[in-house]
Image: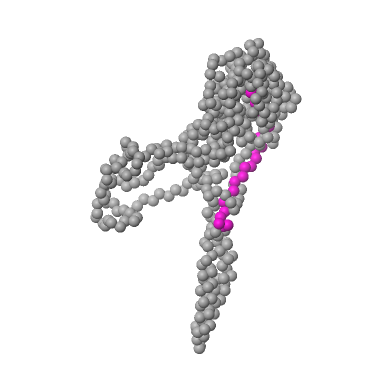
Amino acid sequence: MAQFIDRRLNGKNKSAVNRQRFLRRHKEQIKESVADAVNRRSITNTETGEDVSIPHKDIKEPVFHQGRGGLKERVHPGNDQFITGDKIERPKGGGQGGGSGDGDASPDGEGQDDFVFQISKDEYLDILFEDLELPNLEKNQINKITEWKTHRAGYQTAGVPANISIVKSLQQSLARRTAMTAGKKRFLHELEDELERIKNSEPAQLLEEKRLKAEIQELRDKIAAVPFIDTFDLRFKNYERRPIPSSQAVMFCLMDVSGSMDQATKDIAKRFYVLLYLFLTRTYENVEVVFIRHHTQAKEVDEHEFFYSQETGGTIVSSALKLMKEIVADRFPTGEWNIYAAQASDGDNWADDSPRCRELLTKHLLPNCQYFSYIEITRRSHQTLWHEYEKLEGSYDNFAMKNIRSVEDIYPVFRELFRKETA
């Protein structure tokens, strides 16, 4: 007989080892489902997890079985109609789907239902922003930005079943049962000793013996009534996020809200910025985010106005770049801050303003920026702003430009722009 013993150590820093192992095993299918969910969700819906569907064929695991030939002896639970030597008939229908269900059998005799399970909000965001980082981040001012890492932090009395600590819970149960029964057991031993003395005495004291036996039985019943484990014995592994010092950075979000940006284009831009904002707040702490909306004039706004304001007008893209230049000079010294920018537009701009934008980038912004990304949202051919920016792409390593044509392009483009260099 062969025995297989799994001696692999459980991983540390995992809220549920088996669940994390499952997520790692089916990582590609889960990432595809998460990427699809980004396109299905509303712009600001990130408060819940996500249902992930994995094809049935992808969750099959290898099994050990007996080889052909030889004598086999099996024990079948619940057997009440076979004895040794009986031969079991094949299922009716020859295994070709002759069951009594209403559904149609598949050609190969196997079901095709997908395996569906729920991932939490934290797992959803972890997968969403896996292998992403702010490019070229320099540690010029330590202890200003804080990254987070999850660590074990003792035990707690409440939690999810996946985090339960069996050993700690049993220790609590043992301590409780000892505390509740120790006095009774001592008294029980005293009564048993007294009963033994009375039995051996002359003459026998029948009434006293009967009383002692009743008391002994009552004590045994009380001791037996103490439950083996109770709800307040349960202990759950506790995890906390600890800060890891890093650098300080500011992200400028420049969004075109001119009349040429229709509602669908603005929604795509907002989706991109929601992803960016979630990524920054999820991965880093105390990252400054500066929101700038522009048409013919640029204005620094708060988060709510950036995403929900209905203001519109003509298009002068350089107004946003000028405002960014002024804010950097006034509030964010380049020797102390890592400066990032993400600009989203449909590319429509006054013809004589596009060269001015390129000049502002080359002379004032790119020399002081760690990373500047430009996203053009259009299904049409590129316009003057794209062609002017193309002249910069090959000359500056800290400049990137991408085209988004539909909602399905948002997440892939976002990952390309902020992918880890080592990933």
Is residue 53 or residue 238 the one in the foreground? 53
Q: Residue furthest right?
A: 330
Residue 285 at x, y percent in the picture? 66, 36
* Residues in magenta, as a range: 231-255
**Quadrant position of residue 124:** top right
Could you say which is closer to the camera, residue 259 or residue 339?
A: 259
Residue at 54 percent of width and 52 percent of height: 165
Residue at the top extreme of this rendering: 352
Q: Position of residue 298 (x, y in %)?
A: 69, 21
Q: Is residue 409 above or below residue 81?
A: above
Residue 316 picture location, percent across and down: 66, 16
What residue is drawn where x is 59% and y is 19%?
346
| Residue at point 57%, 65% (across, down) | 178
Can residue 198 be seen in this snapshot?
A: no
Q: Which residue is nearer to you in this view: 381 or 359?
A: 381
Quadrant of the rendering where the C terminus is positioned? top right
Residue 331 appears in view: yes
**Image position of 164 with respect to 344: above or below:** below
Q: Is residue 234 magenta?
A: yes
**Viewer-proximal residue among 112 and 84:** 112
Residue at the spot 52% in from the left edge and 66% down from the top edge: 225
Q: Is residue 137 above or below residue 111?
A: above
| 400 horizontally vs 86: left or right | right
Q: What secondary structure do most residues of the magenta stretch adopt?
A: strand
Residue 194, picture quadrant: bottom right
